[in-house]
Structures are given as C-alpha cells and as structure tokens.
Image: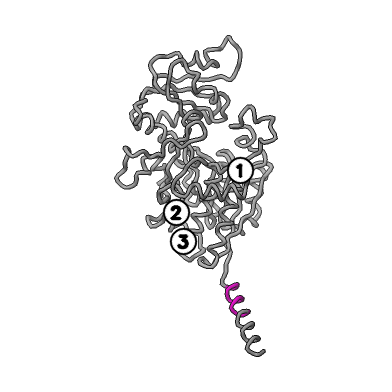
Amino acid sequence: MNLLFLLSFFIFILQNINCEEIKSYNFIMLDKKYDKRYSDWGVHPVDIRSKYNKEKRAIDGARLAIKESEKFIRLSKTKFTLDYLSLESDKELKEFFKNKNNLEYDSILLDLDYQSINIIFSDIKANESQIFFNISTANNELRKNSCLENLLHTFPSTSMITDAIAQYLVEKKRNKVLMLTGPLEEDLQYSKSFKDSAKKFGLKITKERNFVNNNDPRIRDKNDISYLTMDKRYNSVLVSDIDREFALKVPNATSKPATITGSSGLVPQAWHWSYLRHGAPQLNGRFERVNDRRMNERDWSAWISIKVIIESVLRTQVLDNLEILDYMKSSNFRVDGSKGMGLNFRQKTNQLRQPILLVSGGNWVTKVAPLKSFTNQSNDLDTLGILNNSCN
C-alpha cells in the first residue's frame, strides 16, 4: 500500500514538473469578413449560385499546423496556440492594434490584401517584439519598400510568379509573347512584373492589349478573344486577370495556336493538390481529412508560417522573438515545405525562398520552377523573385 502511494506521489510530482516546464507561444490570424479575394475573385461562373461555393479561408491551413505541433510539445517544451479574428473593416483592424491586448500574441498571421497591410505598417514597426507573416499578398512593393524587419512573406511575390512563367517560356522556346491585361490595378501590376521578368530572361513582348469585360459589339477589339489575338507574331499569351473575369475564356479561343499562361492555362502557384512528390500527397491527405476540401496556396502559406516558428523553437530552444528572427534569417535555417528543397528566407526582402508549381488546366503540376536550366551560384531559388530592396 505504501509502495503504491509513493509511486502515485512520484508520478504526480513528475507531471507537475513537466507542466511547469511547458511554456506557451501564441499565434493569431487576422482576416476580413468581406474580402473580395475570397468572395468575388476566381469564382467560376457556375459556382456563383452553387451551394458548393464556399469560401476557402487560410485559417484551415494554420489550424492544421497547430494540430501537428502537438507532437513537438515535449521536445520544444512549448505549447503552440492559435486564435482567429475575422474583422469587419480596416478601422477595426487599426483598433485591434490600439488595444494592448494584441501584445499577448507572439506571432500574427496576416491574411490581408496590400491596402490593409499598408494601413498597419506603423503598428508592425512599433511592435518589433512580434513576428508578422504575410500569408496571402503577392504585391512586389511589400518586398521592395516595406523595410520592416519583423514582417516575413511566406506567400510568393508577383515577381516570383512571373519569373517562373518566363523560365518556362524560355525553355519551351515560346519566347514571343502577346499580353492580355485586365482593367484592375492588380492586373496592371502583374503585367508590369511580367515585363520585368521578360527583360530578365530575354523574352520578346510582341504586343500588349487591354481587355474590357463588356459584350458591346462596338468595342470587340477590347472584349473578343479571337479579335484581340489576331496578331500573327506571337507563340504564347500571357493573361493578366487577377479576378479571372475573362481568363477562363482564353485557352483554345485565340486566333492561332499558342501556349496560354498567367491567370489561366499554365498557372503558377505556391501549392497545388495535384503535386505528387516530396511528401505533398501526405500533407494534402492530412489537410483533406480535417477540412473536407483540398489544400490551396493560401492554406499552405499559413501552414508553413507556423511551421517555421515551430522549427525555430525546436532548434534554438528559445521563445524570444528577436533570437528566433535572427535564426530564421540565418544561413543555418531550413524548413521542409513538402516541395523537395529546404526553404529559408532572403535577408533583405524577408521573402521565403520556395519553388513555384506550374499547374496545367487546374489539375496537374506540369513543371516546378526554378527549372533545371536556370541556376544561381549560391541558391537556384534566387533565380525567382526580388533579391534586394530599397532599404539601407
């Protein structure tokens, strides 16, 4: 009886010691209830009225990462937690940072567009003890001019995306490009980025034409795909249509056969469910079992953001964000993103280096950039995207 009592007491003491050792690292994800990128952009016309048209929010990827972190509690002596706040407006976003309660979070995942992130620049800079992750905005300016040491980008930049396209077109000798550009500011930025990529890799842009989403026959030179593509000098078409108002119409509708890429045809993405190598099927399977849908690139970006913190805590055994940041930006850091290469951050732009998947027809990964014929002396992933910024 005494032996049983002593054994029980000993187990109790051990459990309490372990509980005292376990610390907490807290995440929160912020997004907006009405976000046109989810509600309006990229929705297939058939799906607009369909009961299956459900917003696929990136919080699902973050929750998967937290679930997977449970197996590392003993090794890291840390419990990782996640809260989620969906905001009504940019005003509410600003109020979140005015409230000192936001400081209870060690890292903040931002599923916000460029305009919303721009509004909180000063808050990100002021809260230098927190780490912020941009998990859904490709805007190049965030990498070039933000100059925020604690804002990291796990979502690829537009430059990485257009560089991937350019590499593919060069390899396939589809080097004469007709550009079709939509009316949105984001479409113009995408086209501008592709022009930079074309110059970088030696593509020739034969002509750029602007698409107007209007059925008026009097302006068919701006709304009819066959008419817009009557030029004979191209062998590929770059479609810049972020909200996909006309992109789906372009494949097989051009006046001459051509490789279609950009917003339709061969589409560059950070992640896709059809990738079959490097542990991707297992990751996709885990995500599908939990969420009853397929993993997309924003889900992956949220998932990897939390994973880089977990990896850093495991390796350094510290919870101080300044030390974690130093480690994440060092040459020693690597994280497995199920893409076949160890991923790490560029020190100057805070961009996560990563391969880009080139997806055909929305259902097959045709190529993975950087392509083998494009190399860099230090890191082949540096053939994609912006390497430097405007900061001192």
In the rendered structure, does residue 17 fall within the stretch colored magenta?
yes
How far apart are the alpha carbons under marks 2 and 3?
A: 17 Å
The quadrant of the rendering that contains the N terminus is bottom right
Residue 46 pos. (x, y %): 64, 28
Q: Nearer the viewer, residue 371 or 160?
A: 371
The scheme the figure's colours follow is one colour
Give the labeled residue for mark 2. 335
Of discs 2 and 3, which sits in the foreground? 2
209 over 111 or under it: above or below: above
* Amino acid at the residue labelled 1: Arg
> Mark 3 belongs to which amino acid?
Glu
Residue 217, percent from left and from top: 59, 10
Neighbour tally class for label 1: few under 14, some 14-19, many 20 plus, Cα within 10 Å: some
Residue 20, x across and y down, in percent: 59, 73
Residue 380 shows up from this direction: yes
Question: Earlier along the polypeptide chain: callout 2 or callout 3?
Answer: 3
Identify the secondary structure beneath mark 3.
Answer: helix
Q: Disc 1 to disc 3, how far (Cα)? A: 37 Å
Question: Pointer 2: residues within 10 angstroms few (<14), some, or many (20+)?
Answer: some
Q: Which mark is residue 204?
A: none
For the point 65% across and 57% down, the residue is 101
Q: Secondary structure at mark 1?
A: loop
Q: Residue furthest top?
A: 218
Q: Give the label on residue 293, or none.
A: 1
Give the label on residue 323, or none: 3
Q: Nearer the viewer, residue 103 or 156?
A: 156
Please tell me which residue is depicted at 50% across the width and 27% down the height of the picture.
240
| Main secondary-structure element of the magenta-colored stretch | helix
The residue stretch that appears in magenta: 12-20
Q: Amino acid at mark 2?
A: Val
Q: Can you tell which quarter of the image residue 299 is in?
A: top right
